[in-house]
Image (cartoon, rainbow, N blue to C red):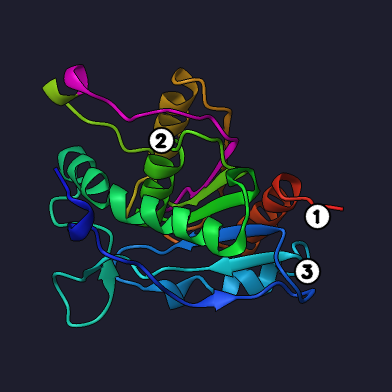
């Protein structure tokens, strides 16, 4: 069991709302394996026009990259199989969950005004933690990732905790060489089986990344889920 003292404290770059003043919503951006919070924070600039009263934060993952002197990881990613992913999202859960609590308190916002955006390993974390929170978030947007579930006998013992069911949009490239595009229908099937309202989009000719089409779809999803208050 992870004790509170052992849970890493996360931090990373932030963007204040474009409109100025206190934010009425928050988007947390979760980077992929080998990157850090700086990798995704510019998405806040791109989406700021649609979300003028939204604050953005992109925390650095809790661990230094195990195979290189720079970069961060949410969990070690060597075998790249279901067993490793399942153990990894479980181990990193508490750190991200605590960070979300702290950021909501920082801005005095309810969970319904928080959306998570992940890329690759960050998508795995967004789904793992976002769906386990007792109060539903505004939504979860995931690029080039998957919904992590256990394999073999572990699946009979315990699966992902689904405590709330916010809308989910998953976007994947059909030429993804890192996480194969088959991860998209697999993830949608497991989410829908758990009662999560999930939909997906497959980007033609896209590898492991985010293209302009994905940015437009993602921005529209966030604007729909986080309309300005008042």
Gap between marks 3 and 1 measured at Cα: 12 Å
Q: Which image quadrant for residue 16?
A: bottom right
Gap between marks 1 and 2 measured at Cα: 26 Å
Gap between marks 3 and 2 measured at Cα: 30 Å
Residue ID for mark 2 = 132
First-in-chain label (3 vs 2)? 3
User: Could you tell me which residue is drawn at 59 percent across and 69 percent down?
Assistant: 43
Image position of 61 with respect to 118: above or below: below
Q: Nearer the viewer, residue 37 or 16?
A: 16
Residue 74 seen in render: yes
User: Could you tell me which residue is drawn at 41 percent across and 59 percent down?
Assistant: 99
- Residue 221, x across and y down, in percent: 68, 48
Q: Secondary structure at mark 3?
A: loop
Identify the magenta region: 155-177
Q: Which mark is residue 49?
A: 3
Question: Majority secondary structure of the magenta segment?
Answer: loop
Image position of 198 with respect to 94: above or below: above
- Residue 38, x across and y down, in percent: 45, 78
Q: Are there few (<14), some (14-19), or many (20+) residues within 10 Å of tag 1?
A: some
Residue ID for mark 1 = 228
Question: Which numbered mark, 3 or 2, is in the foreground of this view?
Answer: 2
């Amino acid at each position: 069991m992870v004790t509170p003292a052992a849970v890493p404290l996360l931090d990373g770059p932030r963007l204040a709302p474009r409109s100025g003043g206190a934010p009425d919503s928050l988007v947390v951006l979760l980077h992929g394996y080998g990157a850090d919070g700086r990798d995704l924070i510019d998405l806040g600039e791109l989406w700021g026009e649609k979300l003028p009263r939204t604050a953005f934060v992109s925390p650095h993952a809790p661990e230094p990259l195990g195979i290189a002197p720079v970069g961060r990881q949410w969990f070690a990613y060597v075998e790249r199989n279901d067993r490793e992913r399942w153990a990894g999202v479980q181990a990193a859960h508490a750190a991200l969950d605590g960070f979300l609590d702290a950021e909501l308190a920082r801005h005095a916002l309810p969970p319904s005004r928080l959306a998570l955006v992940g890329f690759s390993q960050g998508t795995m974390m967004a789904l793992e933690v976002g769906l386990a929170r007792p109060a539903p978030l505004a939504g979860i947007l995931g690029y080039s990732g998957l919904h992590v579930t256990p394999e073999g006998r572990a699946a009979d013992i315990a699966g992902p905790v689904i405590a709330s069911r916010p809308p989910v949009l998953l976007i994947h490239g059909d030429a993804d060489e890192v996480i194969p595009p088959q991860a998209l229908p697999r993830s949608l099937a497991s989410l829908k089986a758990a009662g999560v309202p999930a939909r997906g989009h497959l980007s033609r000719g896209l590898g492991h990344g985010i293209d302009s089409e994905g940015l437009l779809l993602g921005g529209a999803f966030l604007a729909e889920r986080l309309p300005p208050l008042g």
